[in-house]
Amino acid sequence: MMKLLFLSIFLVSALHQADSNGYYDKILSHSRIRARKEGPNVCALQQIMGTKKKYFSTCKNWHQGAICGKKATVKYECCPGYMTMNGQQGCPAVAPIDNVYGTLGIVGALATQDYSDKSDLRQEIEGVGSFTFFAPSNDAWDLLDPEIRGSLLNNVNIELLNALHYHMVNKRLLTKDLKNGLTFESMFNNEKLLINHYPNGIVTVNCARVIHGNQIATNGVVHVIDRVVTAVGNTIQDFVDSEDDLSSLRAASIASNILDKLGEPGHYTLFAPTNEAFEKLPRGVLERIMSDKKAAEALVNYHILDTVQCSEAIMGGAQLDNLEGSNLQVGCDGDSLTINGKKIVNRKDIVTTNGVIHLIDDVLIPDSAKQVLELAGSQQTTFTDLMAQMGLAAALRPEAEYTLLAPLNDAFTDATLKMDQRLLKIIMQNHVLKSKFLLNELYNGQTLETVGGKLLRVFVYRTAVCIENSCMLRGSKEGRNGAIHSFRKVIRPAEESFYDIIRRDRRFSIFLSLIEHAGLKDLLTEAGAWTLFLPTNDAFDGLSNDDIENLKRDKVALQNILLYHLAPGVFIGDGFEPGVTNILKSLQGNKIMITSANNSISVNGVSSPESDLMSSNGVIHVVKKLLFPADLSIGNQQLLTILNKIIKYFTIKFERSASFKEIPWTKYITKVKVIKEPITITKVIGGGETHRRVIQGGTVSEDLGTTVDIISEPTITKVTKVIQEPEFKVIQGGETRVTKVIQEPTITKVTRVIEGEPDFKLIKEGETHLTKFIQGEPTITKITRVIEGDQDFKLIKEGETQITKVIQGPEIKYTRVSTGIGGDTDEATLKRMLEEEVTRVSKFIDGDSQLLDDDELKRLLQGGSQISKVTTIVEGEPSETVQISKIVKEPQVQTVRKVQTSRRQQGQPLRRQMRRSHQS
């Protein structure tokens, strides 16, 4: 127990010490562990083959066996501060401690030691003090420009001494003290030294890498670096302003108001495109970006990192954030830096007071500065070519915003590409949305409108986002005027319902007949969001006609079987998560198990040969076997026998007491009652004033206290408001209604002829009498509200409404019609009579109204002078009624059997029911 406690304390202490020492010390500790078999105090390094460059490498580089993509060999050396002893393994001896001058010799920085002698620096660094010396290695002096090196050696007492003092700080700094982003005043005019300490253990001084650190001296510490550093006094802005080869970048930086920012204190990295790089851009692209301030700002910011990235710190690929808000993939290939995978850096590590500059040969254009079609990748060239050929690319306006749904090249089959150009254009329009939608703005059930006016549905799953039949791939991008998303398939919007698809495909005729027999047709036609696992006729192989008829006998059982194939929600094949079991709950109530592999799905172990048949109310996955819940028992032996003939992929359970439950599927059905034709409503109010209103579709509600939905039968609707309170009387032998309206011409209504005698019923107060004549078109629907009173009928009181609706139908039908002049008339004449105008006749009697006997009524209808009102229904939309009043002299009137006539008389308010005149 004590041993475990001691070990825990030791590990915690070691980790704490490593944290306090920084990244360099962590990597050094790992190098010790890798080389522990070589003896004590040995460190393992990686050396890039063909070079002298060695690294205390990260775990990633160590396991890859490469640095910057180049193969690296393993070298074992004594860790800093230790040395070998003859005849002993590893590095058991501690290196002797000396002053800074002597330590330069211990670490092998002989050229720096020699120059310290020549410049009279030796006396200083051998004396009293506490110094940090960033000593260039011998190779570092060899890499220095010969002209610069020569000028230093020609003036050793000033130039060389100043150069060496610039490598020194007047206090001791170990690597753990060299924090990232710090600056220290050098011993040359207090000029700044910029320190960077990276997570991979690399420590740099003005971008020179520390290759051997923490060599302790009696009067300080020595760190060996891989290059000679020079004093800097310019900012990034100063360099861009003064460099002739960066004039194009300077212009872009000024246009975007970013150049001044590069003159402020900070820690930046600028990947600066040269003028030659800008000249590579298409002229139109450059002009568009430069004329758009936001695009120019995005362009320049895309080249700027908010950290200092020295080239020597890059040992592999890294995603680095830039000021534009995205990131750059910065890597290396041998000695070359790469940006987004390209070797485009021609000059690196230009150190300034506020960062570092790398010159590059290409302009990096961010997505945010591109037009939306320019965002398409190399795998979407077919899409971009078709957009251009169909004229859709030219129609994309720079100031508007769009969303492109771009399928990969493989999604376009030869059959698609050979389509008629007009059809192909419609397909391409389905891939262009009228607005910009980013990936995080999409949600399940959302509809998106295309430039062609189509609506596309969005389906969101755990691991996929799909639009109609196609799911997105990774790599969505946002551009200057829109966004682009990549898709696996060409998107094909649904045009038909489940029912339409199944009805026109004879492969599903048996399933369709069962659906219709079970009364489930509405589920396949109604709007909704369903997934249907649709069995082909092959699923019923082995059943005789008698078996199918027996299957239909138990409607509840049949509904259970069929509704097990239907699940709420739209689930695209690619929306199912591969490698796991996806569980859906069917409308029948039991679970459906779906697995997805190799771009195909299996349902309860039954493979689907064809999936993603999109409909307006869901998606269809075809199966060749009938599905049945494995955990559901059957109590009907005959049904079990039938199902066992076609379901052989598992054993159906039999339980004598089991029975099927009724499924409340009707709650998913929504009846939408629509009046397709306009309704003409006329109010007749005392004084002869007529108000008319036309309603386009919908429901009729006119102060009735109830709403009347007219679903199918076309009718003419007339609303008459009566002022006084006459009364109804019933005259046997038919029904004739005579209504008196104050100061209003008589209105006689002719309703459609039907066969059989009309029935008469007394209607109590508050009830609504609805008479609907079914045969033929047009028909009449009449609603009458009757006031309670005597057993006799009474006329409707003021404020009540009588509605009759007639809308002209496509064909007039009739039954048993005879004329008033005797004899039968042929069908053509009868049809013509019904198609002609209807003359409405009524008699005005001075004084009180009186009942007319049969003879008097007959004379009234067959001759004599009276005031007649002719109502003409004009062809076309029944939105206007033409009313004509005239004096008819001895007319020849043909009476139509079972014609309802309403008659209004002047005088005392009185309305009597009169029977219809029947002619045999």
Image (cartoon, rainbow, N blue to C red):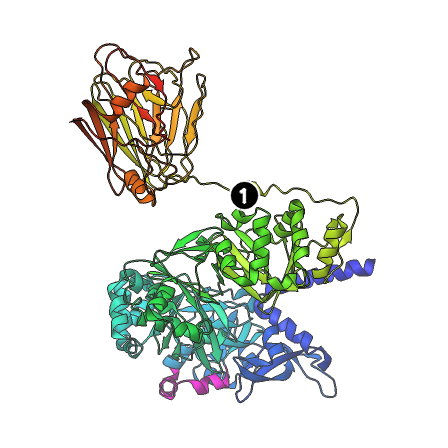
Q: Tell whether 634 sits left or right of 493.
A: right
Q: Position of residue 443 (x, y in %)?
A: 48, 52
Label 1: which secondary element: helix
Q: Is residue 771 above or below residue 552?
A: above
Which residue is rendered at x = 68% and y = 77% of the image? 34
Q: In the rendered view of the protein, which quadrant contains the C terminus? A: top left
Q: Nearer the viewer, residue 524 or 91?
A: 524
Amino acid at dot 1: Tyr
Magenta-highlighted residues: 137-157
Q: Position of residue 209 (x, y in %)?
A: 50, 76
Which residue is rendered at x = 64% and y = 82% of the image? 77
**What kind of secondary structure does the magenta stretch mostly adopt?**
helix
Q: Residues within 10 Å of mark 1 (few under 14, many from 20)?
A: few
Q: Position of residue 93 (x, y in %)?
A: 69, 80
Q: Nearer the viewer, residue 736 or 893?
A: 893
Q: Is residue 150 magenta?
A: yes
* Residue linked to disc 1: 668
Say if residue 624 shows up in the picture: no
Say if residue 118 shows up in the picture: yes
Q: In the rendered view of the protein, which quadrant contains the N terminus? A: bottom right
Q: Is residue 707 magenta?
A: no
Q: Tell whether 797 sits left or right of 442.
A: left
Q: Is residue 308 above or below residue 637?
A: below
Q: Position of residue 68 (x, y in %)?
A: 52, 79
Q: Nearer the viewer, residue 564 or 501?
A: 501
Question: Which quarter of the figure has residue 358?
Answer: bottom left
Q: Is residue 637 above or below residue 674?
A: below
